[in-house]
Image (tube, rainbow, N blue to C red):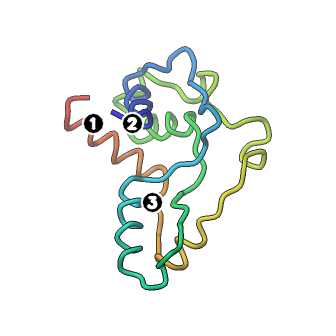
Amino acid sequence: MNTSNQRILEAAQGKFQDEIPDNNLLYLWVDVRDVAAAHVAALEQPAAANKRFFTVAGYYSHREILAIIEKRFPEYNRKISAGATPGGDYPDGGTDRLYRYSNKRSVEILGMKYRDLEESIVDTVKSFQTLGL
């Protein structure tokens, strides 16, 4: 399992009761389904030839992931508390203090419509549930 999915699984399992881990300076995310769609679109769109695309949906923090799980999966609320557990947030100043990105080319040329973080996290947790989370 990759690190991103491992963090989501650990959050749902209640392993962040004492402290939510930091993002380790990596605050950008994209759903793998959107990456796959971008690859297909790049093959199909003549305007994509010889161009590179930055496929990114936005910023995220581990605290946001925990809050989504807490909101959408009440059966895990006894294990997690995004409001009470320290750590896992953006640096002071929020996303304004982070590096910038532009996914404009992928939106304009490839026609990308990125999933939001909540949809991605909810679908990931549901997939874990099918495996016995």
Is the residue 43 above or below the residue 60 in the image? below
Q: Residue 18 appears at what percent x and percent y?
A: 55, 14
- Counting other residues with Cα less than 10 Å from the Cα at mark 1, is it few (<14), some (14-19), or many (20 or more)? some
CA gap, disc 2 and disc 1: 9 Å
Which residue has dot 1 on it? 128
> Are discs 3 and 2 less than 8 Å apart at CB?
no
Look at label 3 and name its amino acid. Arg
- Residue at horizontal 60 percent and vertical 23 percent from the top: 84
- Counting other residues with Cα less than 10 Å from the Cα at mark 2, is it few (<14), some (14-19), or many (20 or more)? some
Q: Residue furthest front?
A: 50
Q: Is residue 82 left or right of residue 12?
A: right
**For numbered disc 1, what is the local secondary structure?**
helix
Mark 3 or 2, which is nearer the eye?
A: 2
To which quarter of the image does residue 124 belong?
A: top left
To which quarter of the image does residue 88 belong?
A: top right
In-front residue for pair 95/28: 28
The quarter of the picture where the C terminus appears is top left
- Residue at horizontal 54 percent and vertical 57 percent from the top: 56
Look at label 2 and name its amino acid. Asn
CA gap, disc 3 and disc 2: 16 Å
Q: Residue 106 appears at what percent x and percent y?
A: 52, 71
Which residue has dot 2 on it? 5
- Counting other residues with Cα less than 10 Å from the Cα at mark 3, is it few (<14), some (14-19), or many (20 or more)? some
